[in-house]
Amino acid sequence: MNIVETAVANGSFKTPVAAVTAADLVTTLSGTGPFTVFAPEDDAFALLPAGTVEGLVKPESKTALASILTYHVITGKVMSTDLKDGMKAKTVNGQEVTIHLKDGKVFVNDAEVVIADVAASNGVVHAINKVIMPS
C-alpha cells in the first residue's frame, strides 16, 4: 500500500486524509516517491484552535492547506534510525524542519513522533502528536 492507502487503513488519520484530498495531494502522495511523511494523527488536529480545520478544507484555503501539508513531507525515505539530533530536513514546501532527540524520544520541531517507521510502498510514515506549521 502507498502512503495514502496506509494512512486510510490505519484509521487514526481520517482528518489528515480528508485534508490531503481537499488540497489535491492524493495523487502526489500516491506517486512513486519515496517520501517521508510526518503525519499528525486525528488527535493532533483536534488540538488546533476551533474552526481551523474547517476553514482550511474550504476551496479558497487550498493553497494554505497544501503549504501546511507539504511541510510535513520530506523527499526520500528517512527511517527513525536515520534521524540525528539537530538535523535539519528540507520539506516539500521548501522550508526546513528540525529534528530533536530528547530522553529517547524523537521530535519534529515540537511534535513528538508517537509511531515510527510505518512502511509504505512509496516511503515511510511517522505519526506525530501535533500539526506543525510552516513560518
Image (tube, rainbow, N blue to C red):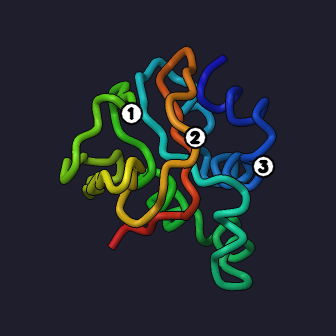
Side of 23 where 31 appears, left or right:
left
Residue 50 vertical placement versus 25 (above, below)? below
Q: CA distance from mark 3 to mark 2?
A: 16 Å
Tell me where residue 108 sits by quadrant.
bottom left
Residue 16 vertical placement versus 35 (above, below)? below
Relative depth, front residue between 85 and 119: 85
Q: Amino acid at mark 1?
A: Ser
Side of 96 where 93 appears, left or right:
right
The residue located at (25%, 47%) in the rendering is: 90
Residue 73 vertical placement versus 15 (above, below)? above
> In x, y percent, where is residue 38?
48, 46
- In the picture of the structure, the residue carrying the numbered disc 2 is 115
Q: Amino acid at mark 2?
A: Ile
Q: Amino acid at mark 3?
A: Lys
> In x, y percent, where is residue 100?
29, 55
- In the picture of the structure, the residue carrying the numbered disc 1 is 80
> In x, y percent, where is residue 27?
59, 31
What label does residue 14 carry, if any? 3
